[in-house]
Image: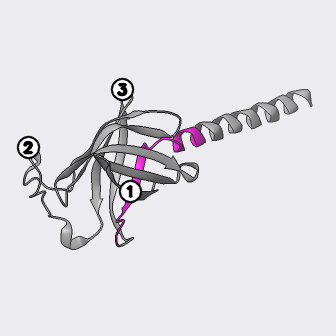
Amino acid sequence: MKKLNKIILLSTFSAVVLASQSALAAMTPVGLWKTIDEDTNQAKSYVRITQTNGTLSGKVETILDPTKQNDICNKCDDELKDQPILGMTIITDVKAEDDDVWGDGEILDPTNGKTYTLQLTVQDEGQKLEVRGYIGFFFRNQYWLRVE
């Protein structure tokens, strides 16, 4: 009976540890996000945010409007000019500022070619991401929803 109690206790402890690790992972921007247009409130794309050596980047993984699958960034500068938006890295060099806020990076809006200083804030227990892009004192907010 003591052995059975130890097994149950160990199993319960393991489940709690795994659940807490999953919750912590969900509190980072790492994952797949559905982008929502702040003007129309319509879903536009899926962006996958990854982390390498403590720095986040994000790439357009899916464009939801079938008529925009082949769109290019004709308003972008430099090497991104006239490149396909699908597969494009639009978030770069983002670093943790505190528990659920990430910043100091950049985000590109491929529809207008503008690059903004970026701050990401994880909300709603990791299910929502506030995406704030700054140019000087002006900013735009979007709220993205976690897909995975």
Q: Could you tell me which quadrant the N terminus lies in?
A: top right
Mark 2 or 3: the one toward you = 2
- Could you say which disc has been placed on residue 53 in the image? 3
Q: Is residue 32 left or right of residue 8?
A: left
Mark 1 residue element: strand
Image height of 71 relative to 53, above or below: below
Of callouts 2 and 3, the N-terminal one = 3
Mark 2 residue element: helix
In the foreground, 84 or 130: 130
Residue 62 quadrant: bottom left
Q: Position of residue 28 (x, y in %)?
A: 48, 41
- Could you say which disc has been placed on residue 84 in the image? none
Q: Is residue 81 left or right of residue 93?
A: left
Asked whether the beta carbons under mark 2 and mark 1 sit within 8 Å of each other, the answer is no
Question: Which residue position holds label 2?
Answer: 79
- Amino acid type, mark 2: Glu
Image point (76%, 30%), residue name: 10
Q: Position of residue 124 (x, y in %)?
A: 57, 53
Instruction: Identify the coloring.
Output: one colour
Most extreme residue toward the right is 1
- Could you say which disc has been placed on residue 141 in the image? 1
Mark 2 burial class by Cα count in 10 Å: few <14, some 14-19, many 20+: few
Image height of 104 relative to 131, above or below: above
Q: Position of residue 59 (x, y in %)?
A: 28, 48
In the foreground, 13 or 43: 43
Of callouts 2 and 1, the N-terminal one = 2
In the foreground, 88 or 122: 122
Asked whether the beta carbons under mark 2 and mark 3 sit within 8 Å of each other, the answer is no
Of callouts 3 and 1, the N-terminal one = 3
| Image label count | 3
Mark 3 burial class by Cα count in 10 Å: few <14, some 14-19, many 20+: few
Look at the image and give the residue range highlighted in magenta.
Answer: 22-39
